[in-house]
Image (cartoon, grey):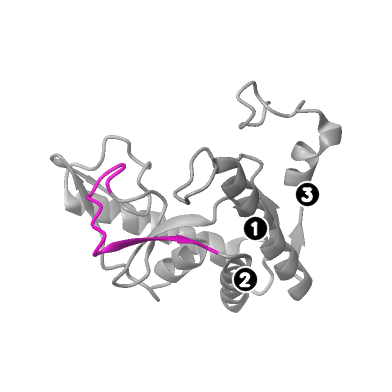
Amino acid sequence: QALQLFERAFGHFQPQEAVWARGDRFIDPYRAGVDPDGFASVDALHQDREHHLACVREVFLRADWIILTLGLTEAWYARQDGAVFPLAPGVAGGTYDPALHGFINFSAREAADDLAALVRHIAQVNPRARLLLTVSTVPIAATFENRHVLVSSTFTKAALRVAADEVERQFDNVVYFPAYEIATSPAAGDHYFEDDLRHLSE
């Protein structure tokens, strides 16, 4: 998603699946939660999206530091062009169609390759920018894989941690901050989590 966001912001990629309907409202498939009620028209959605992408472009062009938290490896995508969604089609809008949509669980190698491509893209438009990587401490609450969610959550965090490590070693302008390790270490004794054992406390 992060790599595709850069590509969209700079006009290198335009997903074919551009709008999800939900009743008489319209949802942006790539920012499904940006307006919980949805947009009143397709034009309003497109205008808001263009403003968002312009702001994203400005961040990549001007930032001294970009902090990127790696969170998930499981994703849903459009079969026609590989566009990755933050939610499965049909959850916040649109309709799931197995002929049009697929599920993928990215490997550590795939995550590292995409992350490295993003670092290279950023360097081309903003050579001074540095990236600080973290891995989300929030375990996943559900999995589409045919296995227990704890197994999938462990895989997700491990794959992303490996990807972050490989990219940090590959690029001088990338550093890793061990937020995941600090919060989840047995030495922390669950002191960093709320009672739901998923979200970090203040």
**Mark 1 = which residue?**
160
Question: Who's the residue at 31% across and 68% down the image?
Answer: 79
**Mark 3 = which residue?**
178
For marks 3 and 2 on the same chain, the one whose residue lies earlier in the sequence: 2
Question: Label 1: how many residues lie within 10 Å, few (<14), some (14-19) or many (20+)?
Answer: many
Range shown magenta: 90-106
Q: Amino acid at mark 1?
A: Leu
Q: Amino acid at mark 3?
A: Pro
Give the percent coordinates (x, y) of residue 47. Answer: 27, 54
Q: Nearer the viewer, residue 116 or 41?
A: 116
For marks 3 and 1 on the same chain, the one whose residue lies earlier in the sequence: 1
Main secondary-structure element of the magenta-colored stretch: loop
Q: Is residue 173 above or below residue 21?
A: below
Inspect this view and state whether residue 66 appears: no
Disc 1, SS:
helix
Disc 2, SS:
helix
- Residue 25 as seen in the image, left or right of residue 49: left
Q: Nearer the viewer, residue 145 or 186?
A: 145
Q: Which mark lies nearer to you, 3 or 1? A: 1
Q: How many marks?
A: 3
Inspect this view and state whether residue 147 appears: yes
How far apart are the alpha carbons under marks 2 and 1? 9 Å
Question: Who's the residue at 69% across and 28% down the image?
Answer: 193
Question: Who's the residue at 25% across and 64% down the image?
Answer: 100
